Image (cartoon, rainbow, N blue to C red):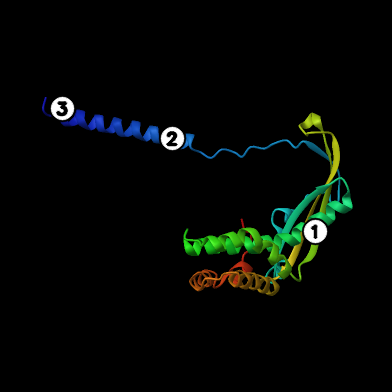
Amino acid sequence: MKELLPFALLVTLVLTQSCSSSKKDEDEEVSEPQEARTFKPDYEVIDASDKIIPDWIKKPHKVDKEEERKNFRYFVNESSNVNQRLCEKSAEARANAQVATEITQFIKNSYAEATQGGENEEVSSYMQEQLAQETQSFVVGASVVKKYWEKRSYKEALGAAQNEVKFYCYTVVKMAKKDLEKATDMARAKLLKSIQAPEVKKKTEDALKDVAKKFTELEEKTE
């Protein structure tokens, strides 16, 4: 009888381990990533400038040849209007403004990361309210690379708010990295000039020491 006890104990351990393994497998099956949902658009495309949607809409740098990319950064934006000309002009203006927006966002992110939550309220407020607008004047040399437009027929039957025809436009611009670095440096200098307290200015200056170079070397959009 005593000889049977170790054997019974061994069987119990094996069964317990087996059940545990089985439960783990079930959990892994349940936690498998699900496919992203897709939604049907509330419009039909009735005309477009190209037969295929350009890949530069999602990845702006793909608009140019590989050898060109090392000297430039690319920015894209979009707009919609019932008038095609106004739609295209708006998309172009937004793409140019996107440069300043991303410079400002990168400066804000870099400052927040360097100070680790100890941001000065004066500095944060200035970046939030004024810096993007002022940085726009430093953006010199951005040029349009390509445009793409679609003519869309929105339909109530497909879920649109109303039946209407509108143009949807995209524009991608590029800016030389040397010009981009200069614009970012000027934005940084503008920010530092707005700070009155010497200690706060020194802390901000240290936090944004290499911000222009780092931003210039980015390949993707700053969020």
Label 1 belongs to which residue?
A: 92
- The quarter in which the N terminus is drawn is top left
* Kind of residue indicated by mark 2: Asp
* Cα distance in 3D space between marks 2 and 1: 50 Å
Q: Counting other residues with Cα less than 10 Å from the Cα at mark 3, is it few (<14), some (14-19), or many (20 or more)? A: few
Q: Counting other residues with Cα less than 10 Å from the Cα at mark 1, is it few (<14), some (14-19), or many (20 or more)? A: many
Q: Is residue 213 above or below residue 21?
A: below
Provide residue 13's location: percent of width, then percent of height.
25, 33
Query: Mark 2 and mark 3 in contact (Cβ < 8 Å)?
Result: no
Query: Mark 1 and mark 2 in contact (Cβ < 8 Å)?
Result: no
Is residue 90 visible to us here? yes
* Kind of residue indicated by mark 1: Glu
Which circle marks residue 176 in the picture?
none
Q: Determine the residue positioned at 63% across, 63% down.
A: 104
* Cα distance in 3D space between marks 3 and 2: 35 Å
For residue 213, which quarter of the picture?
bottom right
Provide residue 178's location: percent of width, then percent of height.
68, 75
Label 2 vs label 1, nearer the camera = 1
For residue 18, which quarter of the picture?
top left
Which mark is first along the chain, 1 or 2?
A: 2
Q: Secondary structure at mark 3?
A: helix
Provide residue 149's location: percent of width, then percent of height.
83, 50
Label 3 belongs to which residue?
A: 4
Label 2 belongs to which residue?
A: 27
In the visual, does 183 lie left or right of 93? left
Q: Determine the residue positioned at 82% across, 33% down.
A: 162
Which mark is first along the chain, 3 or 1?
A: 3
Provide residue 57's location: percent of width, then percent of height.
73, 54
Q: Secondary structure at mark 2?
A: helix
Q: Counting other residues with Cα less than 10 Å from the Cα at mark 2, is it few (<14), some (14-19), or many (20 or more)? A: few
Q: Quick one: 99 or 66, which is closer to the camera?
A: 99
Q: Secondary structure at mark 1?
A: helix
